[in-house]
Image: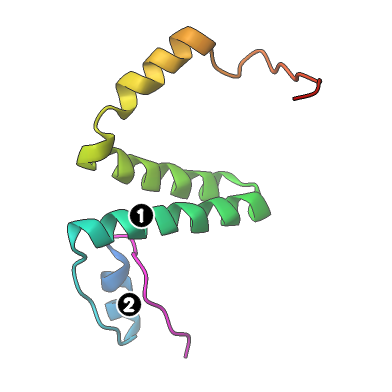
Amino acid sequence: MAKYNKLVRDKIPEYLDSKGISYEKRIATESEYKEELIKKLAEETKEFLEAKNSEELADIQEVIDAIKKLTEFSDFDSIKTKKLKEKGGFEKKIILKGEK
């Protein structure tokens, strides 16, 4: 049986219950939650880089949405808007070549 100790989506315990799979569940502290979200972002990004599909991209967005709700990231949307206004997005597909 595989061992795990990680943050999971809210309905995973229900799924495990329906399959008769035993597990231990606890609620993370706020600081642990932040660290686990950051780990989850790395995990989901790695999976996206390997699979390159919409399902994995959706997982990344779900984690980002959760991170944005943390107090220290409450300014995320305003910073994103400011950067978009100042530097633009990626719609023009510009590739730069040069030396640093």
Q: Is 87 displayed left or right of 97 in the figure? A: left
Left or right side of 24 for 58: right
Could you say where residue 22 lies in the image, as x and y percent from the top left? 30, 87
- What is the secondary structure assignment of the residue under circle 2? helix
Q: Amino acid at mark 2?
A: Leu
Res 5 → quadrant: bottom left
- The label on residue 37 is 1
Q: Please determine whether, in this image, residue 24 is positioned above or below residue 10.
A: below
Outermost residue, bottom direction?
1
Q: Secondary structure at mark 1?
A: helix
Marker disc for residue 16: 2
Q: Residue at (33%, 40%) from the top-left corner?
A: 65
Mark positioned earlier in the residue sequence (1 or 2): 2
Location of residue 30 in the rendering, given as x and y in whole percent from the top left corner: 19, 56
Residue at image position (39%, 14%) is: 82
Which residue is painted at 23% across and 77% down in the image?
25
Dot 2: few (<14), some (14–19), or many (≥20) neighbours within 10 Å?
Answer: few
List x then y, in percent, for residue 1: 47, 91
Based on the picture, tell me whether residue 65 belongs to the magenta stretch: no
Residue 97 lies, with reference to residue 46, above or below; the image says above
Distance in Å between CA atoms under marks 1 and 2: 21 Å
Rate crowding at label 1 as few (under 14), some (14 to 19) or many (20 or more) other CA atoms within 10 Å.
some
Q: Which residues are magenta?
A: 1-10
Rendered-image quadrant of the C terminus:
top right
Residue 6 located within the stretch drawn in magenta: yes
Residue lying farthest front? 100
* Main secondary structure found in the magenta portion: loop
| Residue occupying image coordinates x 45% and y 50% | 59
Look at label 1 and name its amino acid. Leu
